[in-house]
Image (spheres, rainbow, N blue to C red):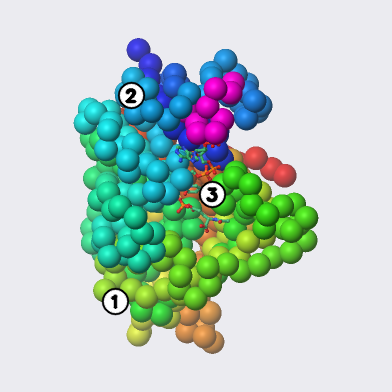
């Protein structure tokens, strides 16, 4: 018997990517898709690329409709999922791609989001190192019934820096990250600043100066990895590409640490991981190397003059940054092999 799945927010970018991956998953069957303004439309009207699901019709995002499924994926705007999740039965596995259940600190929620705080859920980043690398987050996901998927910028930076924090080879209090990000990260809703004529041929920083709402989530993750007193200055730069994130993160070397120690820390962190891969010294990923894949690629070196570690991490924001992480976490929660239905290979060019 296939596992019955519902996707809320199915007309958006994250919802569409969930559906593309779920349609290729051998254990899941998508039976319910919901939307807001597009409710009543055939799915094929908003996602003409999803041919195998063309007979589905978008329904209103009503918890009673979603509760018909065994597994519910939510891809709703921030603040919209809390009210829905409160009305879903305990025995339904719920995976929220929004921010509503990511933060453990209500004060951080108030400061960066505002509105009702709905509490933190199990965090959907299986490869996240915990407690100095003693364990990883995947162990907490087995059997979970409520999972909060990370923000995409958060995933790129966390996977890049956590090994150095966990191993104590970088200083946690002087982290800097600058990210080139694609426009699909902003969602599908109409915004004048995202028009083709505004974006094409130009790059611009946004949420500059420690105000991006992903900041407390990154700090939360790196503290969980073992860093005390984590501070990070993080600046996203919107560039003219539809998908992808390329994060360049740097950190001061801890005293007495060599370049060999650094590489060994990252190698140990990701040895055996299917979806997080460290590239050889001298190789750095391009965001396009991960397009369509649930893969994070990491390039690493030490800038000896500056005394800093430089980590370049690439993900597809809609796959490892959202929909892929959601399905990887669902696989773990349900006791399925973690990589089931998830592509390691991307598309190129
Ligand atoms: N895009 C990305 O790269 C990433 C997104 N996420 C998260 O995933 C979630 C969805 O993002 P994304 O797909 O980009 O956004 P989109 O704007 O593309 O899609 C939003 C979806 O939510 C529906 N919706 C809008 N308003 C409401 C409402 N009030 N109640 C119920 N449904 C509503 C929309 O329906 P309709 O179109 O019919 O109005 C649409 O299906 C967000 O929480 C986002 O932060 C997380 C990581 C990365
Ligand atoms: C281009 C752009 O606007 N990108 C978004 C990324 C959104 C994301 O990663 O996810 P959540 O919204 O779920 O946190 C941003 O920087 O806020």
For the N terminus, which image quadrant? top left
Is 342 on the left-hand or right-hand side of 126? right
Q: Label 3 neighbourhood size at 10 Å, few (<14), some (14-19), many (20+)? A: many
Q: Nearer the viewer, mark 3 or mark 2?
A: 2
Spatial separation of the CA atoms under disc 3 and disc 1: 28 Å
- Please determine whether, in this image, residue 65 is positioned above or below residue 213: above
Residue 310 or 237: which is nearer the viewer?
A: 237
Upstream in sequence: badge 3 or badge 1? 1
Number of numbered markers: 3
Residue 124 showing in the rendered view: no
Instruction: Give me the C-alpha separation between circle 1 and circle 2.
Output: 44 Å
Numbered mark located on residue 317 in the image: 3
Rendered location of residue 10, percent (x, y): 51, 32
Say if 25 sits above or below 162 in the image.
above
Question: Residue 204 falls in which quadrant of the image?
Answer: bottom right
Q: Secondary structure at mark 3?
A: loop
Q: Which mark is residue 64?
A: 2
Give the residues drawn in magenta, as a range.
34-42
Question: How packed is label 1: few (under 14 Cα within 10 Å), some, or many (20 or more)?
Answer: few
User: Is residue 103 visible to the viewer in this orientation of the structure?
Assistant: yes
Q: Nearer the viewer, mark 1 or mark 2?
A: 2
Q: Is the CB atom of the residue marked by disc 3 within 8 angstroms of ligand 1's nearest atom?
A: yes
Residue 196 on image: x %, y %:
75, 52
Which quadrant of the figure contains the C terminus?
A: top right
For residue 145, the mark is none
Which one is earlier in the sequence, the residue at label 1 or at label 2?
A: 2
- Residue 207: x percent and y percent? 53, 68
State the mark number for residue 229: 1
Of the image marks 3 and 2, the number of the one nearer the N terminus: 2
The question of residue 162 being in magenta is answered with no
Q: Dot 1: what SS?
A: loop
Q: Main secondary structure of the magenta part?
A: loop
């Amino acid at each position: 018997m296939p596992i019955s799945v519902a996707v809320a927010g199915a007309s958006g970018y994250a919802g569409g990517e969930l559906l593309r991956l779920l349609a290729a998953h051998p254990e899941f069957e998508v039976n319910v898709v919901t939307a807001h303004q597009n409710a009543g439309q055939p799915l094929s009207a908003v996602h003409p690329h999803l041919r195998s699901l063309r007979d589905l019709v978008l329904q209103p995002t009503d918890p009673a409709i979603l509760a018909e499924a065994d597994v519910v994926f939510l891809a709703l705007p921030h603040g919209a999922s809390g009210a829905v999740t409160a009305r879903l039965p305990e025995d339904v596995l719920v995976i929220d791609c929004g921010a509503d259940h990511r933060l453990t600190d209500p004060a951080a929620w108030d400061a960066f989001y505002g509105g009702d705080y709905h509490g933190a859920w199990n965090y959907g980043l299986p490869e996240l190192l915990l407690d100095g690398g003693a364990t990883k987050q995947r162990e907490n996901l087995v059997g979970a019934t409520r999972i909060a998927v990370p923000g995409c910028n958060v995933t790129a930076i966390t996977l890049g820096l956590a090994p150095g924090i966990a191993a104590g080879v970088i200083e946690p209090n002087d982290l800097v990250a600058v990210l080139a990000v694609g426009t699909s990260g902003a969602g599908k809703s109409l915004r004048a600043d995202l028009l083709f004529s505004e974006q094409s041929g130009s790059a611009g920083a946004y949420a500059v100066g420690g105000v991006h709402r992903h900041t407390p989530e990154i700090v939360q993750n790196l503290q969980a990895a073992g860093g005390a007193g984590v501070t990070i200055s993080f600046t996203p730069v919107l560039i003219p590409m539809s998908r992808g994130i390329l994060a360049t993160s740097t950190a001061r070397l801890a005293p007495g640490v060599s370049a060999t120690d650094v590489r060994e820390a990252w190698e140990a962190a990701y040895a055996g991981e299917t979806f997080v891969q460290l590239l050889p010294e001298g190789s750095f990923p391009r965001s396009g190397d991960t397009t369509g894949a649930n893969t994070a690629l990491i390039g690493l070196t030490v800038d000896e003059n500056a005394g800093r570690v430089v980590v370049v991490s690439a993900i597809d924001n809609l796959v490892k940054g959202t929909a892929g992480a959601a399905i990887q976490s669902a696989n773990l929660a349900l006791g399925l092999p973690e990589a089931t239905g998830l592509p390691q290979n991307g598309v190129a060019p």
